[in-house]
Amino acid sequence: MHEYSIAKGIVKVVMSTIAGREEKVKKIWIKSGIAKAIMPDALFFSFDVLKKQHNQLADTELCLDIVPISGHCNECGQDFEISKIIAICPNCGSSDVEWTGGNELFIEKIEII
Ligand SMILES: [Zn+2]
């Protein structure tokens, strides 16, 4: 389950970010590209299991924001959003398309009490 390793990564980054602090983490905002194909339920479940191992994360809420895939056409220079896995430029119909977004996963914000 790749959501478990993603949740593990989130916990690791947050714990190192708050290292040396006493405060508890209230909320973590995650931004994930749609191409990561995360199942939110699986991610939340994994996070709930993992957060019990850390005192400062005991009451932490995880917020997930899914970002659409964006593409850039090398033929005509159009930037657009992709809803299907096969990327075709809506402007000129070219399939010479560069993936410019949607594959990212990062922690946007951490709120501590
Ligand atoms: Zn184009």
Image (cartoon, rainbow, N blue to C red):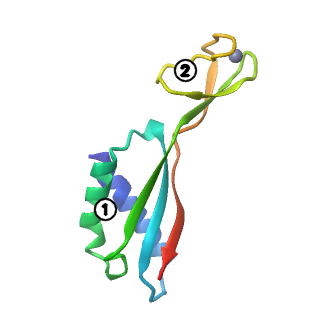
- Quarter occupied by residue 10: bottom left
Q: Residue at x 44, y 70 (%)?
A: 27
Q: Is residue 53 left or right of residue 74?
A: left
Residue indicated by mark 2: 87
Q: Quadrant of residue 76?
A: top right
- Mark sitting on residue 24: none
Of 76 and 19, the residue lying toward us? 76
Mark 1 — residue?
A: 47
> Taking 30 as reference, is 85 above or below it?
above
- Callout 1 environment at 10 Å: few (<14), some (14 to 19), or many (20+)? many
The residue depicted at 50 percent of the width and 74 percent of the height is 111
- At mark 2, the secondary structure is loop
Q: Earlier in the sequence, mark 1 or mark 2?
A: 1
Front-lying residue, 50 or 68: 68
Residue 38: image location, x then y, percent: 37, 44
Q: Is residue 92 left or right of residue 49?
A: right
Marks 1 and 2, how far apart at CA: 32 Å
Q: Who's the residue at 49% across and 19% down the image?
A: 86
Q: Residue furthest bottom?
A: 22
Q: Quadrant of ligand 1?
A: top right
Q: Name the residue located 39 percent from the left edge and 38 percent from the top edge.
A: 37
Identified by mark 2, the residue type is Ala
Rendered location of residue 100, percent (x, y): 62, 35
Residue type, label 1: Phe
Relative vertical location of residue 54 with respect to residue 39 in this rendering, above or below: below
Q: Secondary structure at mark 1?
A: helix
Q: Quadrant of residue 51?
A: bottom left
